[in-house]
Amino acid sequence: MKLLLLTALLLAPALLFANTLQDKHPTGYTDTPLVPGTKWHVHDPDRPLPRVVTPGANNSAPSDAVVLFDGKSLDAWHKQGSNDAAAWKVEGGCAEVNGTGSIETKESFGDCQLHIEWATPAKVESDSQGRGNSGVFLMGLYEVQVLDSYENRTYADGQASALYGQFPPLVNACRRPGEWQTYDIIFRAPRFENGKLAKPARVTVLQNGILTQDAQELLGATMHRVAPEYTEHAAELPLALQDHGNPERYRNIWIRKL
């Protein structure tokens, strides 16, 4: 009995301290105004919490991402427009364009967050659009240009990070030829209603951590020497990477559906 009494006396200060901390740091309030347009109070303790996603280390895929290329195989891809296997060369942890044609994912995507790393040839053999040219085609239709834009004169809406044929990048953030570069892309697919465009596609791009496209609305599907326009399509379509004849390299490709 004395032992129980002694234990209670020892625990009492700790419990009092814990309750005091809870009073100082409550987990929410119900006596606050509603957040406009919602049913939740400001700091509402009952508002659903965000789901947990574990970040990857050093640009590796987070826990909820679809890994499209892990440096070992192109099993998630096939030749664009066919069911043939993607035939780009896979070596040293990267996939290299080799003249066998553009490739696209077997899975389809709409709204997404995309991470992709790319490198243009270290040996410069051409200029303008002939220098390290490739492209990331969201839904196979909307291109974020890949190009060696390091001290390479070309038209503004054809530079790296350009929404090709529509909007130049905000800045030229290119590294030297042969160096690895990153695109982190947030894409919102267009919406169609009754066969007509209801909301245009929107793209945010960070190249090497630098903002190059800021929630830019696209004018339509990517075209060459033709004005862009929209044609109704499915809500999700494959992601494509372009074979433009240059030995571009890609690695560490992952995507999150939003």
Image (spheres, rainbow, N blue to C red):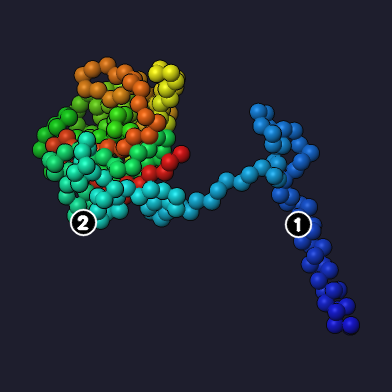
Q: Position of residue 218 (x, y in %)?
A: 36, 23
Q: Which residue is mark 2?
A: 92
Residue 78 in the figure: left or right of residue 48 = left
Q: Residue at x 73, y 51 (%)?
A: 25
Which three-letter amino acid code belongs to the residue tagged 1? Answer: Leu
On the rendered image, what quadrant is the N terminus found in? bottom right
Q: Residue at x 32, y 48 (%)?
A: 68
Q: Residue at x 27, y 37 (%)?
A: 240
Q: Position of residue 153 (x, y in %)?
A: 19, 28
* Residue 66 seen from this side: yes
Within the image, what quadrant is residue 28 found in?
top right
**Circle nearer the viewer, 2 or 1:** 2
Question: Is residue 1 placed above or below 28 in the rendered structure?
Answer: below
Q: Residue at x 34, y 34 (%)?
A: 237
Among numbered discs 2 and 1, the one appearing first in the sequence: 1
Q: Which residue is mark 1?
A: 21
Tell me the distance, in whole angstroms, between the alpha carbons under discs 2 and 1: 54 Å
Q: Position of residue 138 (x, y in %)?
A: 33, 34
> Which residue is situated farthest in the left direction here?
125
Which three-letter amino acid code belongs to the residue tagged 2? Answer: Gly
Question: Is residue 179 placed above or below 160 in the rendered structure?
Answer: below
Q: Are marks 2 and 1 in contact (CB under 8 Å)?
A: no
Secondary structure beneath dot 1 equals: helix
